Amino acid sequence: MKLFLVPTPIGNMEDITLRALRVLREVDFVLCEDTRTTKNLLKHYEIEQRCMAYHIHNEHQQLKQIIAQIKLSQSVALVSDAGTPGISDPGFLLLRECIAEGIEVECLPGATALIPAVVNSGLPCDSFYFNGFLPHKKGKESTLRRLSEMKETVVFYESPHRLAKTLVMMQSFFAEDTPISISRELTKIHEENFRGTLADAIAHFPLDKEVKGEIVVVVGGRS
């Protein structure tokens, strides 16, 4: 019995490894964040596979049952809708439980929005802090205050409809000339990589402008 954590493309269908495709073909079944999304990927690569839902809304309730099913199987793959499972996506609870139950776990290398965004930012990436998604409401200001005090480059994810408000809120803790890079729709046809200062970013992404796509924000550390 073995669990494979399999990264899937964050946008461009070509960004998947040959090894990942082989594992998806060979496992007994695939645990998916959204079965419809995963089935589209499998169909694209002509892979016929059994899919089961495993997502943020059922991961606690289904954990024991899924562990039992993994124990009855030779190998199982876990995928998220995009990127590497466990990075701001479901996966950590299952991984931890598999380790506790003595189930072998193997994580394949592959797509994630974090690394292209931080490398592409032009900001120092020999040492950086990844915060995942910011809190929606409670704790957001205290999180931004803490991040503003870091000397390392800071990276976090944000939803498109909260981006402009977050940038405005950052003014309370970061200097206006703080260097910032915002990557949107990475690997997709409408990919955008904005680079400038916090003040520039606020002007580029005003409150009345509709923003679409997945967002990665990279902020220069405190000098």
Image (cartoon, rainbow, N blue to C red):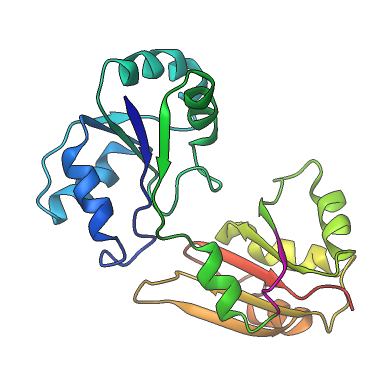
**Secondary structure predominantly adopted by residues drawn in magenta:** loop
Q: Quadrant of the N terminus?
A: top left
The answer to whether residue 207 shows anywhere in this view is no
Query: Along the line of sight, which residue is nearer the eye, 105 or 114?
Result: 105
Query: Along the line of sight, which residue is nearer the eye, 36 or 132?
Result: 132
Q: Quadrant of the C terminus?
A: bottom right
Query: Along the line of sight, which residue is nearer the eye, 158 or 99?
Result: 99
The answer to whether residue 17 shows anywhere in this view is yes
- The image quadrant of residue 159 is bottom right
Q: Residue, x 34% and y 59% (percent of image)? A: 9
Does residue 211 appear to the left or right of 133 in the view shown? Answer: left
Query: Magenta region: which residues?
Result: 124-129
Q: Residue, x 39% and y 13% (percent of image)? A: 65
Residue 165 in magenta stretch: no
Does residue 42 appear to the left or right of 164 in the view shown? Answer: left
Q: Residue, x 33% and y 17% (percent of image)? A: 71
Q: Position of residue 101 (x, y in %)?
A: 48, 18
Q: Position of residue 62 (x, y in %)?
A: 43, 17
Q: Residue, x 34% and y 76% (percent of image)? A: 189
Query: Along the line of sight, which residue is nearer the eye, 47 or 163?
Result: 47
